[in-house]
Image (spheres, rainbow, N blue to C red):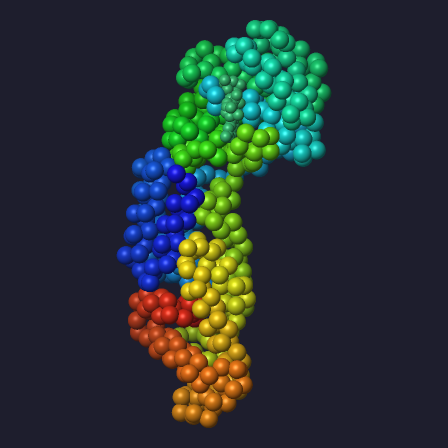
Amino acid sequence: MDLGRSLRQALAKFTGEPIADEKAVKTLCRELQRVLITSDVNVRLVFELTKKIEARSLDSNLPKGLSVREHVAKVVYEELSGMMGTEHAPKISPHKILLLGLYGSGKTTTAGKLAYFYKSRGLSVALVSCDTDRPAAFEQLSQVASQSGSAFYGIKGEKDIKKILADAKVKAKEDIVIVDSSGRSAFDESLVEQLKAISNEFSPDEKFLVLSADIGQVAGKQASQFNEAIGLSGVIITKLDGSGKGGGALSAVASSKAKVAFIGTGEKMDALEPFNAQKFVGRLLGFPDLEALLEKVKKISDEQSVPASLDDKLTLKVFYEQLRAAKKLGPLSGVFSMLGAADVPSDMVNTSEKKMKKFESIIGSMTPAEREDAALLRKSRSRIERIAAGSGTTPEDVRDLLVQFERVSGMFSQFKKNRGFRKKMEKMLKGSNIDLSKIQDN
Ligand SMILES: Nc1nc2c(ncn2[C@@H]2O[C@H](COP(=O)(O)OP(=O)(O)OP(=O)(O)O)[C@@H](O)[C@H]2O)c(=O)[nH]1
Ligand SMILES: [Mg+2]
């Protein structure tokens, strides 16, 4: 089961709802619960998350320049990112790293990937084999070192960690020195002893616990155990590419006292990246550029001459500017897909784009006086015909725009009396697909 796909489907279902109201938000939250619990996210975390999403989504104080759908998408993105963790900025300067963890978690592979990571940032790297227990560990790390183009140190068959590390200390002049250690089938005292001994000899700057995403929320418990016993600088979660439990592993570590530092997303040397929860969740939700998009929306709405107060009148001119603002955001289809509504039938997206273009040219063909006072048009068939001819549309199209505009104006004046305004506006928006919710007083 693909977490990203399920999350995108849940969000697309919401953005495709006719009305983005309380009921739709509740349905979205239930859907998110199901998806996240399937990804082995702890049930308590899931409920905390959806409670926050629900409360923030239904908050009637919409941030400036956002429609309800954009707002909810942003809230889901922010809360999910918050639950998955934070951001790690790796030190790109000489330092020493110890990798530790249970059997098969990916320590040795990760040593190579980290080496590759630092090498491609211009640092020289050495790998040191301190897995004195597993017979083939020495050869495996030596291979990984040559794959990643790094130096390799170790003493084959040597069981004494002190000797290995003393030897490496003399020989290794590289910027980054990474020690690979033995695994265990479970957390135990003998492993803690061994890791403490390595720490004493090697004095690592970073101690990274390597965990496989397969273990899901158990990752939280392991992170806590190792953190208490030896003090971690971070956790590396591997095999995120093949596991349906990645969400569970990441969120569990985020809620422990340890933090995710890197994630592994494949067996190849380049399949490792510093963890960034927002980037990760953005990718899952299918809008890697959400922040950029929202920035754009905000910038444009700041530039707009939206009615400054409730006493201002909504004119066709403002309507036109709103329309232009929406167009500046790029093709609507792109905006839709960034909001996770990739599954909206393409003909629906195309129709609304076409309609927007028409509206824009119709308003462009009006005189300034007509844009200020739509009543001039309502009464005059000849004006409507002139505008239709000037914009290459039909009088029907012009009337269609006037009807839309009137519905919006009607709601705008109701806003003065009615706090439930936004919900009605959302209903309206469905028909035009123009983001008129920007016409508001805050
Ligand atoms: N798909 C995938 N496989 C991975 C990833 N990281 C490691 N593996 C695979 O996981 C298996 C175990 O990896 P190792 O690096 O040997 O694990 P280890 O922790 O060193 O294991 P021990 O030394 O036995 O404790 C190998 O087959 C790796 O190729 C990853 O991010 N994605
Ligand atoms: Mg190993």
Q: Is residue 216 left or right of residue 317?
A: left
The residue under the point 37% across, 59% down is 16
State whether residue 173 is above or below residue 93.
above
Q: Is residue 195 left or right of residue 61?
A: right
Q: How many marks?
A: 0
The residue under the point 49% across, 51% down is 287
- Can the viewer see residue 302? no
The residue under the point 29% across, 52% down is 26
The residue under the point 39% across, 49% down is 9
- Can the viewer see residue 374? yes
Residue 346: x %, y % from top left = 45, 61
- Asked which quadrant contains residue 225, the reply is top left
Residue 321: x %, y % from top left = 51, 74
Q: Quadrant of the N terminus?
A: top left
- Asked which quadrant contains residue 440, the reply is bottom left
State whether residue 311 is above or below residue 70.
below
Q: Is residue 5 left or right of residue 34?
A: right
Considering depth in this image, is 7 or 164 the residue closer to the camera?
7
- Asked which quadrant contains residue 410, the reply is bottom left
Residue 99: x %, y % from top left = 54, 22
Considering depth in this image, is 109 or 174 the residue closer to the camera?
109
Residue 302: x %, y % from top left = 52, 66
Q: Quadrant of the C terminus?
A: bottom left
Residue with the most extreme left position:
23
Considering depth in this image, is 244 or 228 the residue closer to the camera?
244
Considering depth in this image, is 351 or 247 the residue closer to the camera?
351
